[in-house]
Amino acid sequence: MRATYLYGAGDVRVIDVPDPIVKEPTDAIVRVVRACVCGSDLHPYHSMPATPGGTSIGHEFVGIVEDAGAEVRSVKAGDFVIAPFAWSDGTCDFCREGLQTSCRHGGFWNSGEVGGGQAEAVRVPLADGTLVAVPVEENSPLVPSLLTLSDVYGTGYHAAIKAHVGPRTTVTVVGDGAVGLLAVLAARQLGAEQIILMGRHAARTDLGREFGASEVVAERGEEGIARVRELTGGDGTHVVLEAVGHMPAYDQAVGVVRAGGVISRVGVPQYDDAPVGFSSLFGPNITLTGGPAPARAYIETLLPGVLDGSVNPGRVFDLELPLAGIADAYRAMDNREALKVIIRP
Amino acid sequence: MRATYLYGAGDVRVIDVPDPIVKEPTDAIVRVVRACVCGSDLHPYHSMPATPGGTSIGHEFVGIVEDAGAEVRSVKAGDFVIAPFAWSDGTCDFCREGLQTSCRHGGFWNSGEVGGGQAEAVRVPLADGTLVAVPVEENSPLVPSLLTLSDVYGTGYHAAIKAHVGPRTTVTVVGDGAVGLLAVLAARQLGAEQIILMGRHAARTDLGREFGASEVVAERGEEGIARVRELTGGDGTHVVLEAVGHMPAYDQAVGVVRAGGVISRVGVPQYDDAPVGFSSLFGPNITLTGGPAPARAYIETLLPGVLDGSVNPGRVFDLELPLAGIADAYRAMDNREALKVIIRP
């Protein structure tokens, strides 16, 4: 089959690899119907050292089960399934607590003998714990929105859940990428009374407004902080959802959070150390939370709204390309010509 | 009157200052019955540059109201009162939310025209919001425990509350100072099922066991982390209450917290930046919380247990000295000859 490999910064190739097969009785083989490129894929796309063997890439996909091991009970050949960005057993204490990203027997795509989602097919370990079957056809118009449940919609929702967003919560979202926009949608679903979206790409922030942002702040740095403070009577917001991962976004978050509030990060941090001392977090009793979303935990909660059409998170996809053109997908997202690219194997 | 002033590192003096008087109609004047020295007082005691004018010090006291302004309603001359370590109006949105340390009109002792608690008397601004009258005599044996409600008991409790300690929570407490020991007591009151106290002063950790610690770990650094992991099946604890404020305590906390867990800091951080990236907090979805305790918020909750004798947080005091001997109190705490010194003006 064909699969996407990254060989170093900027070097994305689609190559031939052996078809995945059932190795464990708990495996399923999923033929990919749609995959996509994640903002977090751009981090290695920028920085990976040249690697002769390359590494498979992609962690978001939906597809059709083609084969399943003898012990798989919850899905069968022919089912349309959503694969979250981590695989997990669904039964350990972490999974039962809803932290499938820390599953005792789970893992992430593109590690060990498990491939990536930007491919024609994927071997899915622990299929019963990992996959969610959905009663739709593979040509359903809902497919793009279902695909966001693999990662970006669940990730935006995770940010809001970890921050305890609810009615009477005021929220700032830092970042107008797919995760930031879906954090806006999630905050709106959870009842937030004010949602300020910080971003400066009008096409994206316009979608953010449709998803529920009450204000957009295009300014950055000190100017952006001043603007959010101005919109909140000087106080900042109860919650900041940080969906970027770079240091300036962290500083922005610290600058606009209200005393006693929460900064919830879901942008993968591209830094190790950050200010957490008296003047940043401690003095005003700020909580810092977040991490990789247990996307699996949120699928049952978020699926009904997608199926009944009351939300349409798939609108974050603004370009579709065939798998053979995935290098263009990376380029388009990196140049910010595309918000998020959906891939058709 | 006599009041304690710090003139630089190691230079504590008791000097004559004018008696405090009612300046605002919302003020009360409190004659100090007992004050004490805080672990956080040792930070400027170690590092304050020589300052010719000195600065008043002390932020924990109980006493008798001697005078009150015309607008004061909740306390009157002769009342025994507890003063939390911040003064606050009790009516603004932050106070109503229980974050009196961020009160819109409040402040801290030893700032502006407000003196410190290690003195014969203190002018208390916003007396209605700040002071809590308690029906006891000034020679009551409960006075030491009531004094802990000024700061250290409320601070230990704040750590546990911010971390949502409850039944089925496993807890590590880092630090065997007064706040650490009272964090143990608070975690026990909130029902924690396992409480591991990290500390290496046997007299203190013995008191920690009486307050509810199920295990004591005397080792530090990597060895201490390994020991806590060993006691928790390799996982670490759901919650870490960090009651020190130095960087090694932060590293210790990161080392022993379970995936998905919470580090709650109440030791005033003596650092600005700390690890918060993928490998420390983000990857395992760790929450970092805490800050200066709104001690005022917890007095009504914690007072009944003190009054009925079911808890005795005043046991953290192991030395009593007169105000004239307060320099010895600082020395004794700094040398770790005393856990916490109560001061008798």
Image (cartoon, coloured by chain):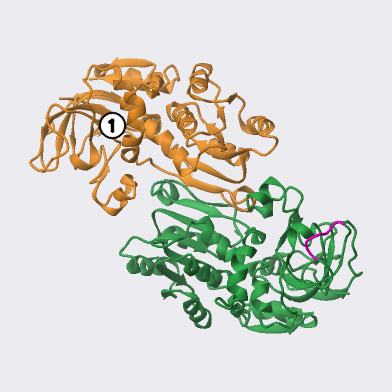
Chain colours: A orange, B green
For image coordinates 48% across by 49% down, the residue present is B276
Image vertical order of residue B149 relative to residue A184, above or below: below
Query: Which chain's residue wears label 1?
Result: A
Residue B247 seen in render: no
Residue toward you, B212 or B253: B212
Quadrant of the image occupied by residue A194: top right
- Please provide the residue range marked out in magenta: B71-75
Q: Main secondary structure of the magenta part?
A: loop
Q: Quadrant of the N terminus of chain B?
A: bottom right
State whether residue B75 appears in this view: yes
Q: In the visual, does B109 lie left or right of A265?
A: right
* Count of picture labels: 1
Residue A162: say if magenta.
no
**Residue A18, image x, y percentages:** 12, 30
Q: Measured along the vertical axis of the image, is residue B125 above or below residue A140?
A: below
The reply, left or right, for residue B14 in relation to residue A16 is right
Residue depicted at 89% across the width and 58% down the height: B70
Name which residue lies at 32% across and 21% down: A144
Question: Which residue type carries mark 1?
Answer: Ile
Q: Quadrant of residue B56?
A: bottom right
Residue bearing mark 1? A57
Which residue is drawn at the image coordinates 47% and 27% (left, top)?
A181
Q: Nearer the viewer, residue B174 or A247?
A: B174
On whether residue B72 falls in the magenta region, the answer is: yes
Relative placement, left or right, of A254 versus B9 is left
Q: Residues within 10 Å of mark 1 (few under 14, many from 20)?
A: many
What percent of the width, then of the height, locates residue A9?
A: 36, 30
Relative to B302, residue B98 above or below: above
Name the one closer to the observer, A330 or A141: A141
Residue B298, x across and y down, in percent: 62, 62
